[in-house]
Image: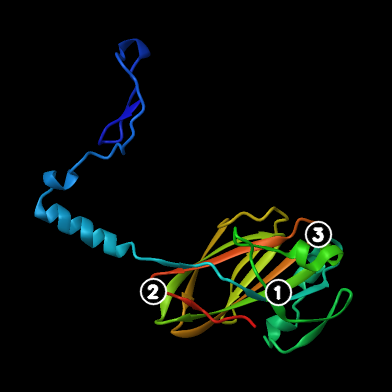
Amino acid sequence: MLRDANGKDHRIPKKEIEERNSLQESIMPANLVAYMTEDDLLDICEHLLTLKSAALAPKAFRLIGPLEGGEGGDAGFETPMEPERKLDFASTLKGKDGAVSWRVARPDSAGYVNLQEIHGPSAANSVSYAALVLESPVAQPGLILLGADDCSRLWVNGEKVHEDRAHEAAKPGKFRVPVRLKAGANTILLKISNGSNPHGFFLAVSAADELKEVPAR
């Protein structure tokens, strides 16, 4: 199968092929620049500059939970809790099995925060909150890449930007949530519920100008 420069495919019957072998180099034509005009090169450089994008995969999140979620975690997911009303990282809340406070949760090498592992048997029928604080050098649009197991809700600087009630496995970047970041500190808050395990989330943030993570302690 050959695809030409216009995107049209051409199927070549095997009987018409005299020889086949594997190439050890790229299929990109060699010395391509020699065939381009100065205007072509300027256009390419200008386009590459527009592709600048800084993606941040957080090293740690602030986490509180497990909180009582009820059957499937749905009742707790629908019930506004203290972190939604006032985000205080020094606070202590009534959890499923006693008092819980904010602590640090770190993603694994794939970027997955395994809440099942963190909460243990208490993860079932629960709700948790995870928070991230980012510094943006300018006011700019951003994109949150989220995958959550199960239901998820997102706020950025107190404004709700995402909600999903599906009980599905977490997939990286399943939800691509456009947001508006302000210059300075930006707080991202995730509410996540769980029915039965597995349970956890992926979360990363992309923006044109580089973002810096405020360390979670």
Residue at the image position 72 percent from the left and 89 percent from the top: 90
Q: Earlier in the sequence, mark 3 or mark 2?
A: 3
Q: Amino acid at mark 1?
A: Tyr
133 to the left or right of 15? right
In percent of width and height, residue 29 lies at 23, 38
Residue 47 in view of the camera: yes
Dot 2 crowding, Cα within 10 Å, few <14, some 14–19, many 20+: some
Q: Residue at x 80, y 64 (%)?
A: 73
Residue 56 in picture, x, y percent from top left = 49, 69
Residue ranking furthest to the top: 15
Q: Please, what is the three-letter code of the amino acid marked with disc 2?
A: Asp
How many numbered markers are drawn? 3
Give the structural element (helix, strand or loop) at label 2: loop
Point out residue 13 in the picture as x, y percentages from the top left corner: 35, 14
Q: Which labelled disc corresponds to residue 195?
A: 3
The residue where tag 1 is placed is 129
User: Could you say whether the residue bearing mark 1 is in a helix, strand or loop?
Assistant: strand
Q: Examine the image and state in which quarter residue 140 appears.
A: bottom left
Q: What residue type is disc 3 on?
A: Gly
C-alpha distance separating marks 1 and 2: 27 Å
Q: CA distance from mark 3 to mark 1?
A: 15 Å
Q: Position of residue 98 (x, y in %)?
A: 88, 79
The reply to whether dot 3 and dot 2 touch (C-beta < 8 Å) is: no
For image coordinates 25% across by 36% down, the residue present is: 5
Quarter of the N terminus within the rendering: top left
- The residue identified by callout 2 is 209
Helix, strand or loop status at disc 3: loop
| Badge 3 vs badge 1, beta-carbon distance below 8 Å | no
Q: Closer to us: mark 3 or mark 2? A: 2
